[in-house]
Image: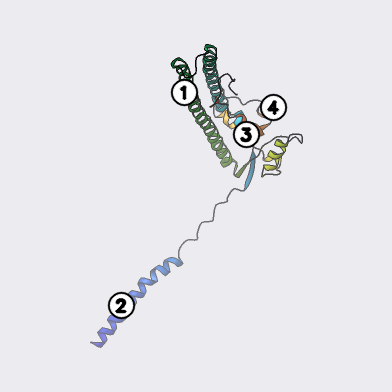
């Protein structure tokens, strides 16, 4: 009985040891880990403002957008002139203040002004959203184009940089130049023209001449936003543009 018990015990230990030995053996024979892929290390520079100004979709949509703004300004100008005419008629009528007829004139003018300001604010919001959508779509397309170009060329990072000549007599341009985080780069790293060419090539179009696409790109973001009708004006005063 003791001998059988000893044999059973030894056999059980062997089985347990065997179970734990299998993983150890498997670990020892595992194939070596694959080498890490080579990460891209090249860097590049692009003038996003210049690309935006040259983007064909941006140009087309901005022209249509500015036409809408101009039409709205013309319509609001006429409404403003109509309010001013009513104000002049009220003054010329010399009605007794507080009389029913005088009050009707006053209420009519007040209602027109309230409607004018409400509609102007609504139109401003509409234009702001439309301009934001144009900028969003344009910038999204530019980033995607840069990404595709960078992937093919093995570029790891692309930095935005405004290409313009600061003027000591214009403090704004000096401040804009100093605000840029990138102080210097080798001109061969500039891929701005390559990105513009890629954008036009994807649409089967011929890119504009380099001197036409260039220029003072520092103000591109400011000129991209078209003016909206004034939200609050006084009758008889021209609409501010």
Q: Position of residue 4 (x, y in %)?
A: 25, 84
Q: Pointer 3: what residue?
A: 49
Q: Earlier in the sequence, mark 4 or mark 2?
A: 2
Q: Pointer 2: what residue?
A: 12
**In the displayed structure, does residue 171 sit left or right of residue 42?**
right
**In the displayed structure, does residue 195 sit left or right of residue 123?**
right
Q: Earlier in the sequence, mark 4 or mark 1?
A: 1
Front disc: 4 or 2: 4
Q: Indicate the secondary structure of the residue bearing disc 2.
A: helix
Q: Position of residue 209 (x, y in %)?
A: 66, 25
| Residue 204 at least partly seen | no
Nearer to us in this view, 149 or 53 = 53
Residue drawn at (64%, 42%) of the image: 44
Compute the Cα span from label 2 to label 3.
77 Å
Front disc: 2 or 3: 3
Q: Which residue extends farthest left?
A: 1
Residue 100: quadrant of the picture: top left
Q: Earlier in the sequence, mark 2 or mark 3?
A: 2
Tag 3–tag 4 contact (CB < 8 Å): no
Compute the Cα span from label 1 to label 3.
38 Å
Q: Pointer 4: what residue?
A: 211
Compute the Cα span from label 3 to label 4.
15 Å
Tag 4–tag 2 contact (CB < 8 Å): no
10 Å neighbourhood of mark 1: few (<14), some, or many (≥20)?
few
Q: Pointer 1: what residue?
A: 115
């Amino acid at each position: 009985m003791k001998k059988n018990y000893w044999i059973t015990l030894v056999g059980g230990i062997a089985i347990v040891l065997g179970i734990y030995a299998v993983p150890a053996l498997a670990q020892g024979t595992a194939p070596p880990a694959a080498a890490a892929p080579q990460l891209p290390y090249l860097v590049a520079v692009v003038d996003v403002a210049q690309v935006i100004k040259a983007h064909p979709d941006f140009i087309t949509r901005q022209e249509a957008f500015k036409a809408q703004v101009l039409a709205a300004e013309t319509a609001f100008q006429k409404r403003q002139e109509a309010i001013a005419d009513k104000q002049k008629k009220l003054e010329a009528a010399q009605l007794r203040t507080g009389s029913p007829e005088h009050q009707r004139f006053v209420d009519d003018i007040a209602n027109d002004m309230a409607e004018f300001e409400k509609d102007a604010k609504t139109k401003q919001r509409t234009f702001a959203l439309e301009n934001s959508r144009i900028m969003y779509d344009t910038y999204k397309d530019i980033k995607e184009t840069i990404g595709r170009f960078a992937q093919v060329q093995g570029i790891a990072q692309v930095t935005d940089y405004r290409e313009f000549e600061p003027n000591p007599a214009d403090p704004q341009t000096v401040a804009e130049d100093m605000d840029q985080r990138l102080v210097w780069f080798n001109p061969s790293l500039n891929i701005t023209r390559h990105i513009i060419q890629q954008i036009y090539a994807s649409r089967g179009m011929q890119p504009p001449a380099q001197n036409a696409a260039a220029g003072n790109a520092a103000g591109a973001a400011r000129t991209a936003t078209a003016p909206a009708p004034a939200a609050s004006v006084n009758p008889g005063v021209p609409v501010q543009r």
